[in-house]
Image (cartoon, rainbow, N blue to C red):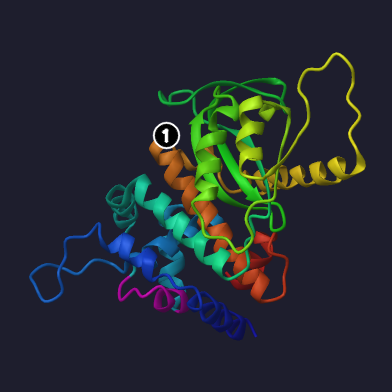
Amino acid sequence: MILNRRASLRKTLSTLDLSEAEKVLKSKYKYTPGKQGRPPLPPIGMFLSFTIMFLRMESYRDYHAFLERDMFWKRTLGFDRVPDIGSFSNFLKRIGPSSFEHLFQVVVQQLLDEGFLNLYVIAQDGSILEANLDDPEAGWGWDHIKKEFVYGYKIHVTVDTHTELPVTLSITKAGVHDSKEFQRLYTNVKSYNARCPTHCFTADKAYDSSDIRKTLLRDNVIPVIKASKTRIKPHYPDLFLKRYAKRVSVERFFSRLKNYLDLKKHQVAGKNNVLIYSYIIIIGMLLISYVNYRFGFSPRSVKTFLRTFT
């Protein structure tokens, strides 16, 4: 039964057109077929390896041992030989953050084309990722959940409120205000080709800005943002509160993400490395959520995938 499910997983993943992603990855290699030199490990196989590795919360060494034991995944990922531990580090250095960003956008666009993701109602927020104190590129920021200053980075995302999955993201120092990343993320949202244009944008009081509201209204997008400072407590209509309740989708996403993106556990340091690892984890969550959806599971349950298929 497990083998049939695994075969179905391979079949489902094959429905995703990763040819654009493969072009992005192969552009980072100088190897030409037929010429001297050892051919590189399959780029898509290496890329998907990181997805599996970090969602399984394994080290390079543990994942190497996993592939040595599991011939199914070795074949599925296209490996004639199991990559050695150094191959994973070299792959990350070769690809770089800009290429991972491109890969992320390719995957999001395809899932939009498939009708799995939707930009009709989106939510945006930021959350602090705690880093080691010896990371010189991180910074201090106030964590309103822990009610204390935390040293690390802040990940800013825009999510599709239906699937609770991200469509844009950025990384800053922990002290950067959430609203500072609005324009960057909103511009990225508008760059996608979506069947239904964005109708509603919801965010917390940190985004209560006349500039943000004007930008949204100019594009006929309804801003569902509570007022940050008022002398009189505002009364919000029921329709506003119903739409505002969808903002919790981004908080749920952060809760799931932090189960896997533990910077201290993985010893990730430096903004570019944090960005790369964020893209790896989130691309994996997008693909796995799509697989869950195709199998009739909730697209929000990454653990269902891990329990059933790995």
Q: In the picture, residue 202 is in which quadrant?
A: top right
User: Is 24 or 306 nearer to us in this picture?
Assistant: 24
* Quadrant that contains the N terminus: bottom right
User: Is 235 or 2 nearer to us in this picture?
Assistant: 235
User: Is 8 or 61 nearer to us in this picture?
Assistant: 8
Q: Which residue is drawn at 40% across and 40% down?
A: 273
Q: Can residue 30 be seen in this view?
A: yes
The residue pinned by badge 1 equals: 271
| Magenta highlight on residue 63 | no
| Magenta highlight on residue 75 | yes
Left or right of 50 in this view: 307: right
How many numbered discs sit on the rendered protein? 1
Q: What element carries label 1?
A: helix
In the displayed image of the protein, which residue is found farthest to the left? Answer: 36
Badge 1 density bin: few <14, some 14–19, many ≥20, Cα 10 Å? some
Q: Position of residue 52 (x, y in %)?
A: 50, 62
Q: Which residue is drawn at 81% across and 46% down?
A: 243
Image position of 297 with respect to 168: above or below:
below
* Quadrant that contains the C terminus: bottom right
Q: Where is residue 161 in the image (x, y as percent from the top left)?
A: 71, 52
Left or right of 156 in this view: 224: right
Magenta stretch: give its range. 72-81
Q: Which residue is drawn at 30% across and 76% down?
A: 80
Image position of 170 with respect to 291: above or below:
above
Q: For the residue marked with disc 1, what is the amino acid?
A: Lys
Q: Position of residue 305 (x, y in %)?
A: 64, 67
Image position of 75 with respect to 58: above or below:
below
